[in-house]
Structure formats: C-alpha cells, structure tokens
Image: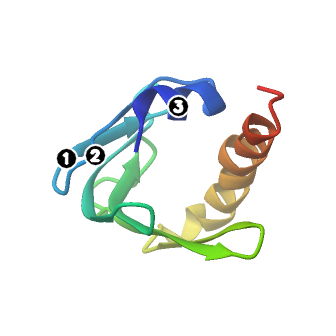
Amino acid sequence: MDSKKHAAFTGDSAEISSRVGGKIAAGDGYIHGKNLGLVKGKKIVQAWATTEWPDGYPPSRLQITLKKTKGGTRLEMVHSKVPAEQRDYYAQGWKDYYWEPLKSYFAGKR
C-alpha cells in the first residue's frame, strides 16, 4: 500500500491509497480501481480493472491475504470476476509484471 515501493519493484508509476474507498492506479494508468477492504499486514481487497476491460464490464475483485509462516510470510491471491477472454492474459501478467519483479526486489536485485 505504498506507491513508491510499488513503483520501485514494478518499474511503473503507481498511486495507491492506504485507506478503504481510496483510489488505486498502477502501470502508468493501465490498472485502476479502489480499495474495498484493508487489514494492515493481513488483507487487501480491491475493485480492479484495466484500460483493456470490455466496455461496460464491472470491476474484478482482487483479494490478497498475508499469513505469517515459519521463516516468512505466505501470500495468497484471488483475482475473480475477470473477463473470461482475458483470464489467461492476466494470469500471465501477474507472473511477469508482479511476482517475478517482486521476487527480484526482495532479493535486492531491483
């Protein structure tokens, strides 16, 4: 929930509110939405869409849950209500634009 850190690991601009109802934007405006629920250090729930969303299609729901584990933290993500024809594209996008860069960021390579 930190715009500067988000931009640091993705390499793209980000504006991320840290309050419920606050707006989010990432990927130089490609992703936009708002925070639906926040539990510090435990859960993020967002309404989420991109500039490629079909006209009139409602926002998806992104839920990220963090759970402490022995030696670290487990992150569980559910991204639901994505347009069917775009599911595979976004599934790969999460890997390419978030999870791999985040892994490099935490390893100090970014």
- Please say if 94 is above or below 7: below
- Give the crowd class for mark 2: few <14, some 14-19, many >=20 residues within 10 Å: some
- Please say if 23 is above or below 7: below
Give the position of the N terminus as an image quadrant.
Answer: top left
- Please state which of the two labelled residues, at mark 3 or mark 1, is closer to the viewer: 3
- Please say if 65 is above or below 98: below
Q: Position of residue 108 (x, y in %)?
A: 80, 31
- Give the crowd class for mark 1: few <14, some 14-19, many >=20 residues within 10 Å: some
Give the position of the C terminus as an image quadrant.
Answer: top right
Judging by the rendered image, the residue that carries numbered circle 2 is 18
Q: Nearer the viewer, residue 46 or 103?
A: 103
Judging by the rendered image, the residue that carries numbered circle 3 is 5
Q: Nearer the viewer, residue 30 or 78?
A: 78
What residue appears at the point 27 percent right and 56 percent down from the top-left corner?
A: 35
Give the colouring mode of the picture.
rainbow
Mark 3 / mark 2, whichever is N-terminal: 3
Mark 3 / mark 1, whichever is N-terminal: 3
Instruction: Name the kind of residue labelled 1 in the image.
Output: Gly
The residue positioned farthest toward the left in the image shown: 21
What residue appears at the point 23 percent right and 43 percent down from the top-left corner?
A: 23
Q: Position of residue 36 (x, y in %)?
A: 24, 64
Question: Marks 3/1: CA distance?
Answer: 18 Å
Q: Position of residue 75 (x, y in %)?
A: 62, 68
- Are circles 2 and 1 on residues that touch, CB within 8 Å? yes
Circle 3 SS class: helix
Circle 2 SS class: loop
What label does residue 22 carry, if any? 1
Instruction: Name the kind of residue labelled 2 in the image.
Output: Ser
What residue appears at the point 70 percent right and 43 percent down from the top-left corner?
A: 102
Tell me where residue 60 sits by quadrant: bottom left
